[in-house]
Image (cartoon, helix red, strand yellow):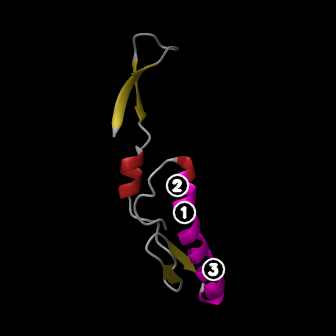
């Protein structure tokens, strides 16, 4: 998406700049692809991608994120939103 903004340096001339994605737009973007040989450890809130050798660490990270996200969101007063990759 492009929007036209007036630059103060060039008064009267329209300057086209790419608008940063909104939070809603960013949330709809698919996650970046993980390497094909990586595993995915999933909970209801997160998906952790890792090398097979890091399976235990990925499980611990997924469990910690799953438990911590509701508390963090509550402290910040925000919604969690869709699954986090």
- Residue at the disc numbered 3: 60
Cβ atoms under marks 1 and 2 closer than 8 Å: yes
Q: Secondary structure at mark 2?
A: helix
Cβ atoms under marks 2 and 3 closer than 8 Å: no
Q: CA distance from mark 2 to mark 3?
A: 20 Å
The residue under the point 35% across, 31% down is 3
**Quadrant for the N terminus in the image:** top left
Instruction: Give whichever of discs 2 and 3 has the lower sequence position.
Output: 3
**Residue 17 pos. (x, y %):** 43, 32
- CA neighbours of label 3 inside 10 A, class few (<14), some (14 to 19), many (20+): few
- CA neighbours of label 2 inside 10 A, class few (<14), some (14 to 19), many (20+): few
Instruction: Give whichever of discs 3 and 1 has the lower sequence position.
Output: 3
- Residue at the disc numbered 2: 73
- Give the image quarter of residue 11: top left
- Give the image quarter of residue 69: bottom right
- CA neighbours of label 1 inside 10 A, class few (<14), some (14 to 19), many (20+): some
Q: Which residues are magenta?
A: 52-74
- Residue at the disc numbered 1: 69
Q: Secondary structure at mark 3?
A: helix
Q: CA distance from mark 1 to mark 2?
A: 6 Å
The residue under the point 40% across, 23% down is 5
**Does 2 appear above or below 51?**
above
Q: Residue furthest bottom?
A: 53
Task: Judge whether residue 15 is colored magenta.
Answer: no
**Does 18 appear above or below 58?**
above
């Amino acid at each position: 998406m492009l929007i036209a903004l007036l630059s103060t340096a060039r008064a009267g001339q329209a300057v086209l700049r790419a608008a940063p994605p909104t939070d809603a737009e960013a949330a709809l973007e698919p996650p970046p692809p993980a390497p094909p040989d990586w595993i995915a450890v999933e909970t209801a809130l997160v998906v952790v991608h890792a090398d097979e050798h890091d399976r235990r660490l990925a499980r611990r990270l997924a469990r910690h994120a799953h438990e911590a996200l509701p508390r963090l969101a509550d402290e910040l007063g925000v919604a969690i939103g869709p699954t986090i990759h």
